[in-house]
Amino acid sequence: MNKLSIGIIRFFESQGFAVVSTIDRAGRPHSSCKGLVDINSSGLIYLLDLYQGKTYENLKKNPNISITAVDEHRFTGYCLKGKARMVIGDKLKPQIIRAWESRITSRIASRLIKNVQGEKGHPRQPEALLPKPKYLIVMKTEEVVDLSPRSLKQEG
């Protein structure tokens, strides 16, 4: 398992969501947006899934997963690859749900502030309409891919 630097941890914590990719039964990639709950230096990443749809079905058959986030403004990003396990329904610890609720509240507050500042986004608060999480994805990072262009890394 790969250790994660504090820079990578902070990068993922600053993102509103990450793109999770799994492999379906036919070997094709499936990508969806998921909310990050926690990430730590030992390479464990925790994501809550609000639905038991394609990601869930894919992970039941194949635990290979990647989690990608990018910051267009800073022209940087990371793809974390590894294996996932699922923690379902009533086995979810209350502190995980509280952490998710805290992130949702923060996203709603951020959207409200941007709306007040005149930066128009979604007219409603979509996060407030989301269902309760169905299960937790726990990924052990095996590989870290820095998505920043090589030429920009050499400048810094």
Image: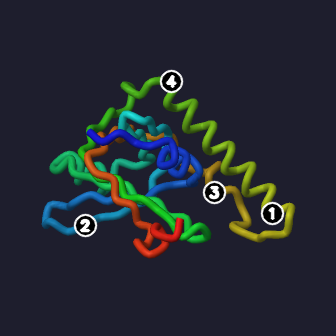
Give the image location of residue 41, x and y in percent: 42, 36
Q: Secondary structure at mark 1?
A: helix
The amino acid type of the residue labelled 2 equals Pro
Q: Quadrant of residue 22?
A: bottom left
Q: Position of residue 35 (x, y in %)?
A: 49, 49
How many badges with numbers are in the image?
4
- Where is 75 relative to 41, above or below? below
- Above or below — where is 23 with respect to 5? below
* Residue displayed at 56% across by 49% down: 130
Judged by depth in the image, the label closer to the viewer, 2 or 4, is 2
Q: Position of residue 128 (x, y in %)?
A: 65, 49
Question: As drawn, is 156 to the left or to the right of 81?
Answer: right
Against 8, is 30 above or below?
below
Q: Which residue is mark 2?
A: 29
- Camera-nearest label, 4 or 3: 4
Earlier in the chain: of badge 2 and badge 4, it is 2
Q: Mark 3 to mark 1: distance in Å?
A: 14 Å
Q: In whole angstroms, how far apart are the C-alphas of marks 4 and 3?
A: 23 Å
Would you name the residue on which mark 1 appears? 115
In the image, what residue occupies the spot 68% across and 45% down?
106
- Estimate the spatial distance between the alpha carbons at disc 3 and disc 2, rounded to whole Å: 27 Å
Labelled disc at residue 94 = 4
Secondary structure category for the residue under label 3: helix
Quadrant containing the N terminus is top left
- Comparing 70 with 97, the one in front is 70
User: Which one is earlier in the sequence, the residue at label 4 or at label 1?
Assistant: 4
Q: Identify the residue at horizontal 78%, vertical 55% (top origin).
A: 112
Dot 3 alpha-carbon crowd within 10 angstroms: few under 14, some 14 to 19, many 20 or more = few
Dot 3 amino acid type: Pro
* Real-space CA distance between mark 4 and mark 1, rounded to the nearest whole angstrom: 32 Å
Q: Quadrant of residue 54?
A: bottom left
Q: Is residue 64 left or right of residue 108?
A: left
